[in-house]
Image: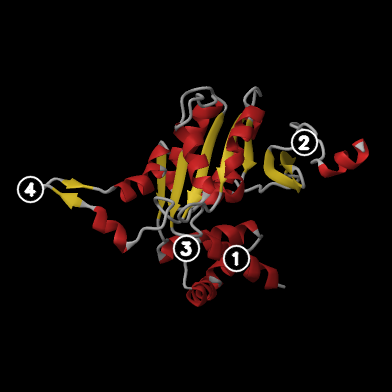
């Protein structure tokens, strides 16, 4: 009987191997009697460096300073990175890990569907000497999603004080993380003296993003910025200055075909171009 009951229960989860990696993913195992989460070490984490990210100097300086404060035990803020796609938001967080890993920084990637587990993750790492950044990539919510409230509570809204060794860094293409509709404007009202008051719907939508202490905005790159990024990646793949100059026209056509001059498109072009060279 015990053996049969044991088969229905989620298997015991081993303690994380903290020395196995500097980056971890939160994983879930679902069973008949419930689900169990654990931290899975990332064997091959991205090696991108801060110097690889061009034309985002202001954003880079702010998140690097905030992360430095964090790993040295000084007050620091949760960070929300929003704006144009492919401009380096996620890469900037990965680069911060590589910059400060030797000083004890660790990264935990959590999917949006698992945000309800944030209290468990924070409790799991609260007693550790390392500093942990919980990384939520490409974050956005639709109406009624459970992870929305869980993230609000984790940021600032629980009776429990925030852990000194945990911050949340999130990226999104939406500034307020929620869809904004024309109908939301109907809830605005104004007094006779002209004061404008947002309705409860709008207040609810901005309340989550407002809990991030540091906002970093990213904008589409100009043509020269895009070509500068192309040149950097081509050089990293071993191309000569002459080959980089010859690639400019192809790089612009590549961007035109994709309707974007983002850093991601520049990197993809550089890989394609360098890979075809004899």
Residue lying farthest to the front in this orientation: 1
From the image, tell me which residue sits under label 2. 20
The answer to which of 175 and 75 lies nearer the viewer is 175
Give SS at disc 2: loop
Mark toward the start of the polypeptide (3 vs 4): 4
Pointer 4: what residue?
Answer: 192
Q: Earlier in the sequence, mark 1 or mark 2?
A: 2
In the picture, which quadrant includes the C terminus?
Answer: bottom right
Labels 3 and 1: the sequence-earlier one:
3
Residue 65 visible in the displayed image: no
Dot 3 and dot 1 residues touching (CB under 8 Å): no
> Residue reaching furthest left?
193
Disc 3 versus disc 4: distance between alpha carbons?
50 Å
Number of numbered discs visible in the structure rendering: 4
Q: Nearer the viewer, mark 3 or mark 1?
A: 1
Residue shown at the point (48%, 75%) measured from the top left:
256
Residue identified by numbered label 1: 268
- Against 137, residue 159 (above or below) is above
To which residue does mark 3 refer? 226
Instruction: Specify the color scheme.
Output: secondary structure
Residue 259: mark in rendering: none
Quadrant in the rendering for residue 221: bottom left
Q: Position of residue 117 (x, y in %)?
A: 61, 39
Does the rendering let one see residue 235? yes
Q: Residue at x 69, y 37 (%)?
A: 22
* Mark whose residue sits in front, 3 or 4: 4
Q: Earlier in the sequence, mark 2 or mark 4?
A: 2
Split into 4 quadrants, where in the image is the N terminus?
Answer: top right
How far apart are labels 1 and 2 at the CA level?
30 Å
Of badges 2 and 3, nearer the viewer stands 2
Q: Bin the neighbour count of mark 1 within 10 Å (Cα to Cα): few under 14, some 14-19, many 20 and up.
A: some
Look at discs 4 and 1 and give the one toward the viewer: 4
């Amino acid at each position: 009987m015990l053996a049969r009951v044991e088969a229905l229960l989620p298997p015991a989860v081993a303690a994380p191997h903290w020395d196995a990696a500097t980056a971890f993913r939160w994983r879930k195992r679902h069973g008949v009697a419930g689900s169990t989460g654990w931290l899975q070490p990332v064997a091959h984490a991205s090696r991108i460096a801060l110097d690889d990210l061009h034309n985002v100097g202001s954003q880079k300086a702010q998140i690097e300073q905030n992360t430095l404060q964090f790993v040295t035990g000084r007050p620091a803020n949760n960070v929300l990175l929003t704006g144009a796609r492919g401009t380096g938001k996620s890469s900037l967080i990965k680069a911060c890990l590589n910059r400060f890993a030797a000083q004890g920084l660790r990264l935990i990637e959590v999917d949006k569907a698992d945000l309800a587990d944030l209290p468990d993750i924070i409790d799991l790492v609260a007693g550790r000497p390392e500093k942990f950044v919980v990384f939520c990539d490409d974050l956005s919510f639709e109406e009624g999603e459970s992870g929305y409230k869980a993230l609000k509570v984790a940021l600032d809204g629980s009776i429990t004080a925030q852990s000194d060794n945990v911050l949340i860094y999130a990226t999104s293409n939406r500034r307020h993380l929620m869809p904004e509709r024309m109908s939301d404007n109907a809830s605005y009202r104004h007094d006779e003296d002209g004061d404008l008051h947002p309705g409860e719907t709008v207040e609810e939508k901005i309340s989550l993003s407002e809990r991030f202490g540091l906002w970093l905005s990213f904008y589409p790159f100009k043509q020269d910025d895009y070509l500068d990024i192309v040149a950097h990646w081509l050089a990293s793949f071993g191309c000569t200055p002459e080959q980089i100059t010859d690639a400019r026209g192809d790089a612009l056509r590549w961007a035109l075909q994709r309707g974007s001059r983002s850093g991601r498109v520049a990197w993809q072009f550089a890989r394609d171009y360098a890979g075809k060279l004899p």
